[in-house]
Amino acid sequence: MFSREMYALGAQPSVIREIFEYGRQRKAAIGKDNVFDFSLGNPSVPAPPVVNETIKRLCDTMEPTVLHGYTSAVGDQGVRQAIADYLNRTHGTAFSAAEFYMTAGAAASLSITFKALSEPGDKLVLLAPFFPEYNVFARAAGMEPVVVKCREDDLQIDFDALDAAFDRNVKAIVVNSPNNPSGVVLSEETVTRLCAFLQEKQAQFGHPVFLISDEPYRELVYGGVRVPFLTKYYDNTIVCYSFSKSLSLPGDRIGYILVPRSADPTGELYKAVCGAGRALGYVCAPSLFQFLVPACLGKTSDISIYQRNRDLLVQAFTEDGFSVAKPDGAFYLFLRSPETDAAAFCERAKQYELLLVPSDSFGFPGYVRICYCVAPEMIERALPAFRKLAQSYGLC
């Protein structure tokens, strides 16, 4: 009567979303100021002024049938060229509009890319910890996810584990740097070693192995940390990008896929991307937000607020006896659970109205994800609750 696989996904929704919905119920019951919700990566910092200014200008000056009508299926030519020009100036590349496919955000970019690459029997390597929906997107595309845990001490790639997991059926590997859920940025040393590893595997197996770079947090880094731009390191790189986090537009869903000519000299892969977008119904990304993009390239929300939130939490957690690595980017902390069962730790945290996400679905048990893209005032109100939680485990 219907797909049992899709039923299973609907009957067991995202753990993150479940906790977020629980938080909405608690806020309605006891007041929003009494609930400390760190579950969802929903930016709290307003979009930069250029966003609203540009939307108003577009609405005032563009012909409505153009502004709100269809663009080309792959996206507006001028918008794609503006993105290419910006990346070329920033990274010393030589992209053209023909290498970009506009999408309704990162989820669409990843779903299309996985579908475009997938052939029967293909595997997709996921580096844990990873965003849980990778599993869903991969399986929907017909790829078998292969989970490889990163090193626990610094969450950089464990190359021995990666080598053990690789076989000739691996079509691609996904990297996400800065990372959700940890905020870790892959070092240039790690990136260089990964690219050399993939080159060796391509030679060994006699077919391309693609590096898919999921980049919604590329600009969200602190303290001058540099995020390597992966097309400069490895020819067979595909970039999946979203403006949702950098511009605080998560509900407006605009992004792109970059299929460089270095990965696609014949243009066949780009055509597969177009075909996958068509098959999945992801054609003609939202027109208004496509036309917004050129004015906002290189702009971000005020990420100094996130940095202050991060520093405040890291200091408090350290003083309370928790173990947490200081992230270099994004707006997540990966905190080690004081007990083996991270879900049980999250349930105890609820006693103090702290809403945290257990790490099991991220492929890396024993931790919790804390989203600090929240109002600084909420963090300050939450610190006594975190202290009580730590005391309940005898940590301080």
Image (spheres, rainbow, N blue to C red):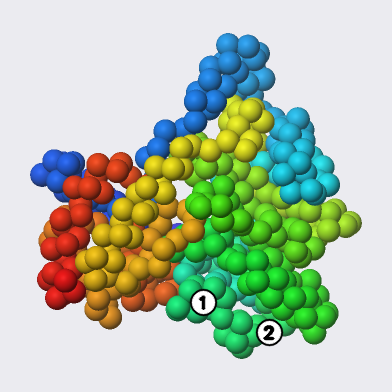
Q: Is residue 348 visible?
A: no
Please tell me whether residue 113 is drawn above or below residue 219 in the rendered image. Answer: below
Q: In the image, 106: left or right of 194?
A: left
Crowd band around label 2 with a 10 angstrom C-alpha radius: few (<14), some (14–19), many (20+): few
Look at the image and tell me in which quarter the C terminus lies. Answer: bottom left
Please tell me whether residue 335 is drawn above or below residue 94 in the rendered image. Answer: below
Mark nearer the N terminus (2 vs 1)? 1
Given the current orientation, which residue lies at the most extreme top position? 60
| SS of the residue under disc 2 | loop
- Looking at the rendered structure, the kind of residue marked 1 is Cys
- Label 2 – label 1 distance at C-alpha: 18 Å
Q: Does the CB distance between marks 2 and 1 fall below 8 Å?
A: no
Where residue 103 appears, as percent x and y from the top left, is: 62, 43
Q: In the picture, residue 327 is in which quadrant?
A: bottom left
Please tell me whether residue 165 is drawn above or below residue 395 in the rendered image. Answer: below
| SS of the residue under disc 1 | loop
Where residue 54 appears, as percent x and y from the top left, is: 57, 22
Camera-nearest residue between 133 and 221: 221
Q: Which residue, given by chain and number where applicable, does mark 2 sit on?
A: 167
Give the tally of numbered discs: 2
Where residue 347 appears, as percent x and y from the top left, is: 19, 66
Q: Please name the residue shown 79% across and 57% down the image.
A: 269
Q: Which residue, given by chain and number where applicable, does mark 1 sit on?
A: 150
Look at the image and tell me in which quarter the N terminus lies. Answer: bottom left
Q: In the picture, residue 160 is in which quadrant?
A: bottom right
Q: In the image, 164: left or right of 377?
A: right
Where residue 168 appears, as percent x and y from the top left, is: 72, 82
Q: Please name the residue shown 13% across and 69% down the image.
A: 391
